[in-house]
Image (spheres, rainbow, N blue to C red):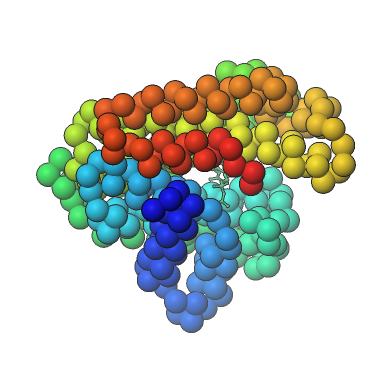
Amino acid sequence: MDLKEYLETSAAQVDAALDGFLPSAKQRPAKIHEAMRYSLFAGGKRLRPVLALAAAEACGGEIELAMPAACAVELMHTYSLVHDDLPCMDDDDLRRGRPTCHKVFGEGMAVLTGDALLTEAFLILSETAPTARYPLSAFIAEFAITGGSTKLIGGQVLDLEGEGRELKKAELVRIHEAKTAALLTSSLRLGAMSANATPAKLDAVTDFGYHLGLAFQVIDDILDVTQTTEVLGKTAGKDEAVAKATYPAILGLDKARKEAARLTKKAMESLEPLGGKGSRLREIAAYLLDREY
Ligand code: GRG
């Protein structure tokens, strides 16, 4: 199967599993379930669950056993987007090309939608089958740490504290480690754990996730600049980029592109302990470096 087909097939499998795990839109109170489904089925790339499934396969496991964890990470990701878009955070009107949850359902309902998605994520994760090396508590702890005050939430705190001032590169890296790399890494780790990965293989996907996560954010920042300037019909320049603390703003576009390539190379090198079985993950890393959306 070529990569495009693999990504589409995996995303479709994740969508079907999410649909099965989630309460139906008719379940009462209907509004909250409608809002959860609105945000979840809004056309996301499903990168994190696909990485979880690919890591499971790379470690010799089966995608069915990784599916609860794969769905749980997508729910945690969607919760973070719903809350990140709120007026008290980034105050965004659009997400995944559609009006944000609070624009459609109101602010109070969007807070509750994020809360419900996160809570549901733990319920789905609890369906994971333990393996010889990893009891269910290891999956739950991994997931809780990722969503907690030292990772996702901590990253958001650093982001809020950094608002309105120029950040140094090291500060930006700390935000990206916590906001972006942590959940990507955890997705891969949970997939690997569902495959009963050896400690060496788990370390390999962890290292891969860290570098891939940082690369993903640099690329996201580059696309933000190039796509915005494309829309405005301007040449990308430092002035447009400094509005937000990003890699292109701090380093300039050229150096940011080189940094993304360097991080992607590091990510690929981390997969050496997986041998040939790491090739799908390597392909995904290469694809993300060249992505245009
Ligand atoms: C808990 C409120 C709260 C925040 C935690 C993760 C996070 C911090 C905020 C989410 C917003 C954000 C800009 C995160 C950075 C990572 C990133 C580039 C997310 C977008 O991921 P994609 O491109 O999105 O995979 P899709 O829509 O394809 O799933």
Q: What is the x, y in percent for residue 208?
A: 39, 31
Residue at 85% across, 32% down: 235
Q: What is the x, y in percent for residue 124?
A: 33, 60
Q: Left or right? Give the position of 231 relative to 207.
A: right
Residue at 59% across, 55% down: 82
- Name, please, the residue furthest toward the front: 2
Residue at 22% across, 44% down: 60
Q: Left or right? Give the position of 226 relative to 285.
A: right
How many dots with numbers? 0
Q: Residue 280 falls in which quadrant of the image? A: top left
Relative to 19, is 206 above or below? Answer: above
Viewer can see residue 154 = no
Viewer can see residue 240 = yes
Relative to 102, is 88 above or below? Answer: above
Nearest the viewer among 19 and 126 is 19
Residue at 26% across, 28% down: 273
Nearest the viewer among 242 and 156 is 242
Please state the quadrant of the image where ligand 1 appears.
top right
Q: What is the x, y in percent for residue 158?
A: 58, 30
Q: Left or right? Give the position of 113 relative to 279.
A: right
Q: What is the x, y in percent for residue 180?
A: 52, 37
- Name, please, the residue furthest toward the left: 132
Q: Residue 134 falls in which quadrant of the image? A: top left
Relative to 164, is 227 above or below? Answer: below
